Amino acid sequence: MRRLICLFGGTFDPVHYGHLKPLNELQQYLAADAVHVLPASVPPHRPAPLASSEQRQTMLQLALREYPGFILDSRELERSGPSWTVLTLQSFRQQYPDASLCLVMGSDAFDGLSSWYHWQQIPQLANIIVIERAGMKTAKRPEWATEHLVRDVDSLRESKSSSILFVSLKGHDISATEIRQRMAHKLDVTGMLPDKVIDYIRQNGIYQA
Ligand code: ATP
């Protein structure tokens, strides 16, 4: 059977349960063989993060103690220049020529995909899994995606790339923006992200107003 590998990139400024819980649910749903969490170095599609790369990496290390099944993958931090997803996928494809590589993203990220660098190459290199939040409006299905849609995990596992699966998971209404704002105003963020990460942010004065 083909190996199914999930790749979940983000700024993680900071990582929170809106990332971790759906990813955990997804890993179980797919019976994924591996889940790589990839912090972006210079995120190309958004403003620079407030926390440094080292701090974001440390926060992920602390958070992933609760999720030992996930692999912290720092290849985008180690590479110079913008963290173009296409380059990351090329490096995974070289490493795993026959795997079903699945790029995981929230529906907000998928909505903006056609503005990404060389985005048309992305489906040539990997499958795409779009996380929708249960009870929320479904994500848009752009016309280019129609012919790539698959409905079940078996079809996804059979294909090395180019399939798109929409998965509806329990929603966690948390964003890093809200956490940064709440922490800047010294408001409680308990339950939005792992306690160890909250302690680290406070100890290092990250996100202070
Ligand atoms: P910010 O608020 O700073 O924009 P964020 O919370 O959206 O950050 P990112 O690191 O930008 O976090 O997101 C990485 C990935 O996680 C993206 O694919 C995004 O769609 C997804 N994501 C973020 N928050 C959630 C959430 N609450 N539920 C499901 N997916 C999420």
Image (cartoon, rainbow, N blue to C red):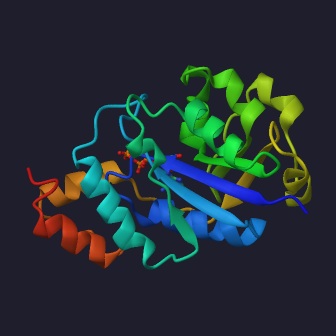
Using the rendered view, name the quadrant where residue 168 is placed.
Answer: bottom right
For residue 134, above or below residue 81? below
Return the x and y of residue 66 as percentages of the image width and height.
Answer: 45, 79
Using the rendered view, name the quadrant where residue 128 is placed.
Answer: top right
For residue 196, above or below residue 125? below
Residue at image position (83%, 49%) is 98
Return the x and y of residue 35 as percentages of the image width and height.
Answer: 62, 62
Return the x and y of residue 187 as percentages of the image width and height.
Answer: 17, 65
Looking at the image, which is closer to me, 140 or 28?
Answer: 28
Looking at the image, which is closer to me, 124 or 106?
Answer: 124
Q: Answer yes or no: is residue 27 visible.
A: yes
Residue occupying the far front of the picture: 95
Residue at image position (61%, 23%) is 114
Return the x and y of residue 68 as percentages of the image width and height.
Answer: 52, 77
Describe residue 120's horizontal placement relative to residue 78 as left or right.
Answer: right
Describe residue 57's horizontal placement relative to residue 165 as left or right.
Answer: left
Total marks placed: 0
Looking at the image, which is closer to me, 178 or 85?
Answer: 85
Residue at image position (80%, 40%) is 161
Describe residue 165's horizontal placement relative to residue 135 as left or right.
Answer: right
Using the rendered view, name the quadrant where residue 94 is placed.
Answer: top right
Residue at image position (61%, 20%) is 118
Q: Answer yes or no: is residue 188 visible.
A: no
Image quarter of the N terminus: bottom right
For residue 188, above or below residue 73? below
